[in-house]
Image (tube, rainbow, N blue to C red):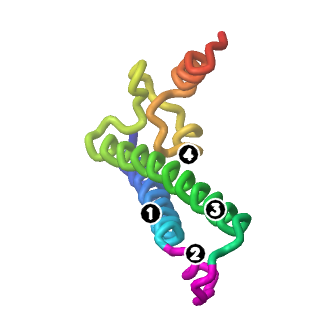
Amino acid sequence: MKKSELAKYEKLLLKKREELLEAIRQKKSQLDSTIKESTGDLSSYSYHMADQGTDAMEREKAFMIASKSGRLLYHVNEALRRLRKGDYGDCQQCGKSIQKRRLQAVPHARLCIECKEQEEEAKTGRR
């Protein structure tokens, strides 16, 4: 792969990394806030059970999004590592080059489309 192409993919990966870090920061601040802080209520009265349930659900949703973002951040960092190591764009399973269209859509891809399909089929048990 040409240096100009690698630079383009590195730029895409760094942009995605920054977006993910910002999303994680936002979710972390949402998780760190208490019920009183988030509602602005300074009273010491207890909240209705439905309000507490809604708050718990929102916190769980924020945690799930942060967790998913963290996993994606790991894959982006691994792609940056591969890029700097010199094997970016090569399928980690078969060794063939990953199509440029795939890398444009999923710059952190570690598998070519054929190997990814095989991996997904193995996960779902379909053939």
Q: Is residue 55 above or below residue 100?
A: below
Foreground label between 4 and 1? 1
Q: Indicate the amino acid at tag 3.
A: Glu
Which is more N-terminal, label 1 or label 2?
1
Residue 120 magenta-highlighted: no
Left or right of 54 on screen, residue 60: left
What is the count of numbered marks? 4
Read off the magenta span. Answer: 33-45
Residue contact between numbered discs 4 and 3, judged by CB atoms under 8 Å: no
Q: Which mark is residue 104?
A: 4
Task: Give the quarter of the image for residue 86.
Answer: top left
| Residue ID for mark 2 | 35
Left or right of 110 on screen, residue 65: right
Q: Indicate the amino acid at tag 4.
A: Gln
Q: Which of the two residues, 31 or 35, is positioned nearer the viewer here?
A: 35
Q: Is residue 98 above or below residue 42?
A: above
Q: Which mark is residue 58?
A: 3
Foreground label between 4 and 3? 3
Which is more N-terminal, label 3 or label 2?
2
Which is more N-terminal, label 1 or label 4?
1
Foreground label between 4 and 2? 2
Element carrying mark 2:
helix
Q: Which mark is residue 21?
A: 1
Report how far apart the C-alphas of labels 4 and 1 lie in the structure: 21 Å
